């Protein structure tokens, strides 16, 4: 996956007064869990722009002012209910030998036969939750919908990989092609059989 670096300052004071002062100064208070100790830090709100306001998924390198660098992923984020400003972010530390759980974005490839015939592609999932080593996880999961006809579905098993485990039941539908008013019957030329002999005629009855 892609990685972003965020330059941050480790903070010692974590009370409400100190947190409010950080926010007033344009800083976002953050916490990193998952390591030997919980790490509290802060960084300018603008530093999180490419991490938060994007459909892409990134790992993050938190570069603290004491020289420490911590690899992490975003776990949870809180926004102000009125202004939508970032109030707080939780991160989980990641390690080379420990799998992580993350929701990866999904996108389709190909041109569905059913859509070409007037059907409509409907999504049940836009993100798929998987578990695996961060070094082996892709930026996005892709599914080929070329052969989907009207009524056909794409399941999570269709995007499975040995590099990660999909944390959804096997019968979970990612997307399907539904019929519409303008839809026409799918052309099933590829299913026709050739060279079929005509049915034998019944013998004429004797007078």
Image (cartoon, rainbow, N blue to C red):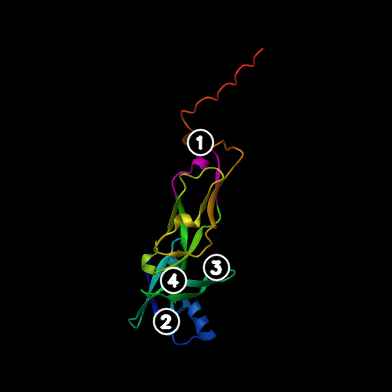
Dot 4 or dot 1, earlier in sequence: 4
Q: Nearer the viewer, mark 4 or mark 1?
A: 1
Q: Which percent across, then down, holds residue 19? A: 51, 82
What secondary structure is marked by label 1?
loop
Q: Is residue 121 left or right of residue 42?
A: right
Badge number at residue 35: 2
Q: CA–CA distance between discs 4 and 2?
A: 13 Å
Badge number at residue 100: 4
Residues under numbered marks 3 and 4 in contact, where contact means CB atoms less than 8 Å apart: no
Q: Nearer the viewer, mark 1 or mark 2?
A: 1
Q: Which percent across, then down, holds residue 63? A: 36, 77
The residue drawn where x is 44% and y is 71% is 100
Quarter of the figure with residue 136: bottom left
Residue pointed to by mark 1: 188
Q: CA–CA distance between discs 4 and 1?
A: 44 Å
Dot 1 or dot 3, earlier in sequence: 3
Residue 119 belongs to magenta span: yes
Dot 1 or dot 2, earlier in sequence: 2
What secondary structure is marked by label 3?
loop
Can the viewer see residue 26? no
Dot 3 or dot 4, earlier in sequence: 3
What secondary structure is marked by label 4?
strand
Q: Quick one: label 2, few (<14), some, or many (20+) residues within 10 Å?
A: few
In-front residue for pair 49/117: 117
Q: Tell me which segment is drawn in magenta.
A: 109-122
- Relative to 76, say whether 66 is above or below: below
Dot 2 or dot 3, earlier in sequence: 2
Residue furthest to the right in view is 207
Q: Which percent across, then down, holds residue 203? A: 60, 19
């Amino acid at each position: 996956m892609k990685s972003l670096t965020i330059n941050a300052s480790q903070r010692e004071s974590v009370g409400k007064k100190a947190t409010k002062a950080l926010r007033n100064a344009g800083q976002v208070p953050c916490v990193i869990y998952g390591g030997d100790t919980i790490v509290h830090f802060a960084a300018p709100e603008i530093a999180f722009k490419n991490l938060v306001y994007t459909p892409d998924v990134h790992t993050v390198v938190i570069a603290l002012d004491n020289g420490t660098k911590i690899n992490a992923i975003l776990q949870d984020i809180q926004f102000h209910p009125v202004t939508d400003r970032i109030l707080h972010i939780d991160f989980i530390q990641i390690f080379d030998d420990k799998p992580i759980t993350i929701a990866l974005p999904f996108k389709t490839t190909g041109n569905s036969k059913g859509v070409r015939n007037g059907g409509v592609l409907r999504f049940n999932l836009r993100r798929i939750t998987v578990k695996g080593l961060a070094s082996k996880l892709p930026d996005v999961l892709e599914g080929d919908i070329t052969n989907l006809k009207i009524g056909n579905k794409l399941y999570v098993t269709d995007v499975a990989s040995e590099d990660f485990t999909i944390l959804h039941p096997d019968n979970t539908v990612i997307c399907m092609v539904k019929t519409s008013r303008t839809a026409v019957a799918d052309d099933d030329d590829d299913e026709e059989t050739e060279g079929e002999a005509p049915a034998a005629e019944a013998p004429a009855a004797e007078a």
